[in-house]
Image (cartoon, coloured by chain):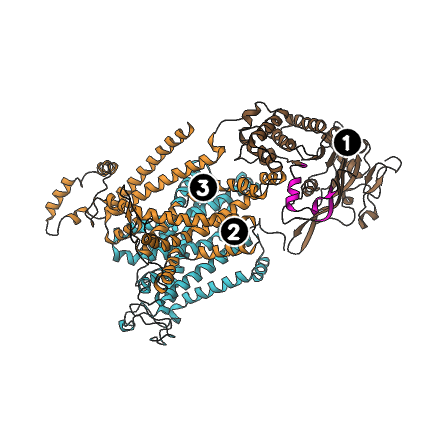
Amino acid sequence: MALLEVRGLEVAFPQGRRAEALALRGVDLDLEPGERLGVVGESGAGKSMLAFAILNLIAAPGRISAGSIAFEGRNLLDLSSDEIRKVRGDRISMIFQDPMMTLNPVLTIGTQMVETLQAHRRIGWDEARKLSIERLAQVAIPSSETRFDSYPHELSGGLRQRVVIAIALLTDPEIIIADEPTTALDVTIQAEIMSLILRLCRENRVGLILITHDLGVVAEATERLMIMCAEKVVEEGPTRAIIDTPDHPYSRGLLAALPQRSERGKPLNQIPGSMPGIADLPGGCAYHPRCERAYAGCHLEAPALEAHGPRRVACFRPLLEKAEA
Amino acid sequence: MHILAFLIRRSAQAVIVMLVISVIGFSIQDQLGDPLRELVGQSVSEAERDAMRDRMGLNDPFWVQYFRFLGNAVHGDLGNSYFFKKPALDVILAKFPATFELVIGATLIFVSISIPAGVYCAINPRSLLARAIMGGSIIGISVPIFLTAIFLIWIFAVELGWMPSYGRGETVTLPWGWPTGFLTRDGLAHLVLPSISLASIMLPLFVRLIRAEMMETLGTEYVRFAWAKGLTARRVWFVHAFRNTLLPVVTVGGMQIGTLIAYTILTETVFQWPGMGFLFLEAVNRVDTPLIIAYIIVVGLIFVVVNTIVDLVYTLINPMVKLPGAQG
Amino acid sequence: MLSLSAFTRRFLADPTAIGAFIVVAALVAMAVLAPWIAPHDPYDPLQIDIMDSEMPPSWMPGGEERFLLGTDPQGRGVLSTIMHGTGISLLIGIGAVIVQAFIGVSLGLISGYRGGWIDSFLMRLADIQMSLSTLMLAIISLAVFSAAFGPEAYAQYAIFFLILVIGVAEWPRYARTVRASVLAEKKKEYVDAARIIGLAPRIIMRRHILPNTLTPVLVISTIQVAEAIVTEAALSFLGLGMPVNRPSLGSLIRSGFEFIFSGSWWITLFPAIVLILLILSINLLGDWLRDTLNPKLRRGED
């Protein structure tokens, strides 16, 4: 039994007065303790939706319309609001994308750290303060004692994200879900922050679900990888395998589009077209209008995610033969 | 240190504003009627009038008269009321406690109702109660305050006879000369209907404001993060969301002072409440110019002082404004 | 922009909007047709008999058929005075909004398009004016006018003073709205194109930018009419507005107020009801208009 087992997760949003459109169309996800999983896709593919859905944080009028989320054997969707509150921030933490917006501007850093600890265990303010300052030091924030009493706007973007990481680790969670943790930061700091996250996850044996659109980061940071397209998973398996030999045409398209993979003097490789909105999906496979390998059958039926060697792929004409996958 | 600098700067601005108001006030006084008319009878000849004008300095150039006016004003002398034959400023300030207590009564009511109502509507926007409150607020906005006051008088004072219908009732004078209505049962009874009337027009405004700001705050990333951290609902709503809601509410609320003063005048008129507003309208009817000007200046001063206090409060509760320039 | 057919469809689907519109239309019709359909002419001294004063409504003891809603202390029929009074309230409300809109839109266009110091100055002025509040500005201005002109002359020109003062007091709201639109439009390419061709700023503002700012102006205008009517009613109630012999709904309530204590409640109640109905339905209509024309709120229903 994996630490986290997501099966058939669906998220629906109302469209107009009567209809609903799916922002997540049946996603499966497995995570073992301490494992690092990457979730990759274009903007709007549903990656963030997946992150919020796992903690049941989908804001109304959206709702989780189907599926199960088994954490340590218990289905999180069956829990009462008090029980799920105890999981959030304690057993499963999140790191959001933009540290400018993640921290409350009118409360000190210290307050926002101590309250996290006090929400989940019986601990006095002084002890909580001590723990928090230790954590701030661990994420390499200088003068952590004085920083404890600072306000978020007094810190730079990079420092703020370190604080957010510190908060995520405060309660020694089993899993951290990081939703594009470096996208909003300066390019020069991105690598620092990413390696900090990885080091801390490795040291503390914390599972990591890393959501990003940056394939370069994912290649180094993760052991397994999930490629999402149009609110579904299209390929899933060991990171190295997918990066070296992509199976789904979309995966290949994504990899080819990396600037490192282009040839000097030639135009950059692009996947033609763009992601369809959740309300105007084409029939059958959602990728087929942009796919160079599409044939008649792709329009009729959507391919299911099927085992293909050690990985799984949702395609009627995957790039690899079963033996090669 | 920063607060001191802020106060100094705002005081300077306040002085400038008061100067502008004093110029406006004086110009109005200059144009409005002839003080001589009030002081002497019809039988005084034109030549004698002219001589009197000269002696009183009424034929001096505008700026000379203005500075004389300003000099007097700074000493608290805004001329004498034609009707009361007493210093205008004294007459106005004598009515200040009545107006002030009315405003306090109304504020207590509307603050203690609008905050819970607004917060509740923001947290449960689709509930029946929330919809009822919002519906009620549209009606509240559409009924002019003087009509609310009249209806309240009609029902509770005339038909049912539960409450008095006019005046302030019995007051007790506090040691420093402030007559208060809060300490007697009669005084309190007289305060009830006027306070409710005044509160009733501020309520819909604030309930909608608090609801709107709170809903916006509840949609922010940091509130989402607070939920993700597993904080209790109470903490998310009242520590994270409400604190941030207060900031724009204080700002917008501060801008309602002018409206509040105007509505106070209306309330005082309906209830014949012996406050500054009622006095002002009587002065207008009697064309008691010094009293009119004195009122305008006093209201201007109140306006400036309250605005400064509101800005100060805002600076104190918003940490981002406290230390402008310090960076991490 | 919403197409006319989509607009009508939404309107017919919303019972509140339809109801509010019917009430407003009925009251406007009553006001416009008052000279012909009112049972009496309350301004003709020959038709008024002091012996008819303070008669209760016709269905109560002491009432008569010819005065359906009773009479006021001068002997005028309450129904007739309400009919004419509504017209005056509406006239002032709409007149004031036209003045506000004209001043506000012009200043908003200039402020938004020119920017710079004139923008800062106008917006600062708008801030100060808005924080003073329209009612307060109006009270003080009208108090000064009435003291300066004397009661008789003031009464004669009251309607102009009211339209002027309420109009000038509320321009900031229009200016801010238009300025926001202008700033948004200014960034768009068609403005650059027009400027490159060499069109004068005034023409660019009028021909190109103005049409795009009209939707928000239309949205706030309806609610502003209700606001103006409320303000005028308050001013007349204070005695700073329409005089007793040519009353608006506010002045009617003023003259009827003292008679609540002597039991003649009808002199106050009926004008009050009409006033509330008028304001409420215009507000509801304005709210509906704002929600319908707000592009951010539409969720792909058409």
How much space separates mark 1 and mark 3, taking CA atoms?
52 Å
Element assignment for label 2: helix
Give the colour of chain C.
cyan
Depth check, front residue: B18 or B164: B164
Q: Is residue A217 visible?
A: yes
What residue lies at 66% left-to-right and 43% top-to-bottom? Answer: A84
Work out whether disc 1 and disc 3 sit on a shared chain. Answer: no
Placement of the C terminus of chain A among the 4 image quadrants: top right
Residue B186 position (above or below residue C110): below
Q: Reply yes or no: does residue A67 show up in magenta.
A: yes
Q: Which mark is residue A223?
A: 1
Q: Position of residue C226 (x, y in %)?
A: 43, 56
Q: Chain of mark 2?
A: C
Question: Does B39 sit left or right of B294 as displayed?
Answer: left
Q: Chain of mark 3?
A: B
Q: Residues within 10 Å of mark 1 (few under 14, many from 20)?
A: some
The type of residue carrying mark 3 is Thr
Element assignment for label 1: loop
Q: Is residue C110 visible?
A: no
Placement of the N terminus of chain A among the 4 image quadrants: top right
The type of residue carrying mark 2 is Thr
Q: Which mark is residue B251?
A: 3
How much space separates mark 3 and mark 2, taking CA atoms?
28 Å
Q: Reply yes or no: does residue A202 show up in magenta.
A: no
**Which chain is drawn using brown?**
A
Q: Nearer the viewer, mark 3 or mark 2?
A: 3
The residue segment tinted magenta is A65-92
Q: Nearer the viewer, mark 1 or mark 3?
A: 1
Residue C56 position (above or below residue C115): below
Q: Which mark is residue C215?
A: 2
